[in-house]
Amino acid sequence: MSLIRILKALSALPILLALVCAAFAVISLSGYVSGHDSLYRPIPGGASTHPLTAVSILLISVSTIGGYWQECTRWRIGMTVVAAVIEIIRISDWVLGHEFHTQITPFQSVVASEVAAGLNNGFGINTALALLGISIARILADLKRPVASQIVVFSAMALPNITLIGYAYSLPKIYGQMSLLTATLTLILGSTVLFETAGKDLMQSAMTRGIRRIGFLHMVAGFWIPVLLGYLVFQAIPASTITSGKFIGLYVVGTCWIFMILAGVANVFYQRLLEENRQLLAAMTEAAETDQLTELANRRRFKSFGEFEFERALRTGRPLWAIVIDVDYFKDINDSAGHDAGDATLVAIAQLLRQHSRAIDLVARLGGDEFAAILTDTPREGAQTWVHQLQQRAAALRVQGQESIAVQLSIGAACSSGKASLGETLKSADYYLYEAKEAGRNRAVLEPEPSVSLPLKASA
């Protein structure tokens, strides 16, 4: 699957994931209303989703959903800021030893009664830090700072990861006051930010096709291998001997994140190196297919373009015309006015051909004083008009050097109809160019219709 298809698929995920988070946040709050603690405490007797946590998740989720309507930008940022303020109040209480957040907590009486009964229902500092990081990342994404947003949200997602590892290892010291539902929803919210900024550096490097797909495997392996190894170690160690589970969980997650960040950064630089190589290759290809003096296409480009268009003409039944052009008495210009004047004449003719042609056609310098053109999807009348007007414009052209140089062109033209190849068409055009020169030069000869010949002499 190409990167564009992946990004299109990911663009629909944030709103779906945000809807899931919003639904579960509403369900958690409804549990406080109805008195069914199973709606906000997924494990009986375990940690619960605090009302302020549910409110913050709901605000960020609705903000994410609103991001798909441009007119909603202000209020979506406002909702994210409100969520961030809630987290800042909780963090300030933790730092200063206050309990101000309890004054703004909905269903505080339910929370207080559960705490008095010895149940775990608190707005933990890890939850506040994780949601604050996601809020900041969401604001940065809205402000078109995708890379900074990715860095912040990656850091914020480490905290719920620690919690999930604690649940996986059955170590309450690791997951603390963060419920399994809170950790899961927080990770999902963080993922919405990553998916929204998926077209930029870290995330883009992890999803690009080809060799860079190895970077994605590095990031996946860098996360899951330490987690699985840690799980096996914890299963092998008696639970009674574990006294610092929180630090072990932090070590496991820190190791995972270090590997993932290193893989991401390495892939960013590798992606940029590949982009530079692509640009260099494109420049080299263009140089190899461009005439250095006139900056027209050269013989190599003319041949590849002509063969492609000839095959297309065969398929569609719309003919092309091959035009070969020779500058009359060019050797005399070089001998009398000098090679600089000769070069100036070639450049002037190239500019004339470029201005005279459509974007779908190709004009080229085949070498020396010989030029050529491919006129695609062109009937006979169109080719006749093209060469006639070209000779008129060439007759009016004057190249300034030591003396004014008049330009005369001999032209031969042939149609692809009835030909087996581009080479055969060009051979016919060369034949009619020879006829134009034999007829006295400064004229055009088109391949005739049956029993019709069309010599065209330039206007005086």
Image (tube, rainbow, N blue to C red):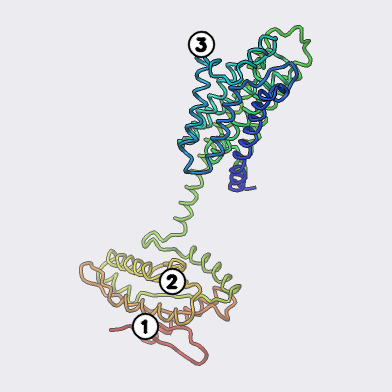
Circle 3 or circle 1, nearest the eye: 3
Q: Left or right: where does residue 391 sit relative to residue 102?
A: left
Which amino acid type is shown beneath numbered disc 1?
Answer: Arg
Residue 397 in the image: x percent, y percent? 28, 73
First of labels 2, 1 by sequence position = 2
Residue located beneath label 3 in the image: 95
- Work out how far the residue at label 3 is from the one at label 2, CA to CA, in angstroms: 79 Å
Residue marked by disc 2: 372
Q: Secondary structure at mark 1?
A: strand
Q: Nearer the viewer, mark 3 or mark 2?
A: 3
User: Residue drawn 73% across and 18% down?
Assistant: 169
Q: CA distance from mark 3 to mark 1?
A: 92 Å
Question: Which residue is disc 1 drawn over?
Answer: 443
Residue 31 falls in which quadrant of the image? top right
What is the x, y in percent for residue 229? 73, 21
Give residue 433's position: percent from left, percent from top.
43, 80
Q: Amino acid at mark 2?
A: Ala
The front one of 401 and 128 is 128
119 w.r.t. 144: above or below: above
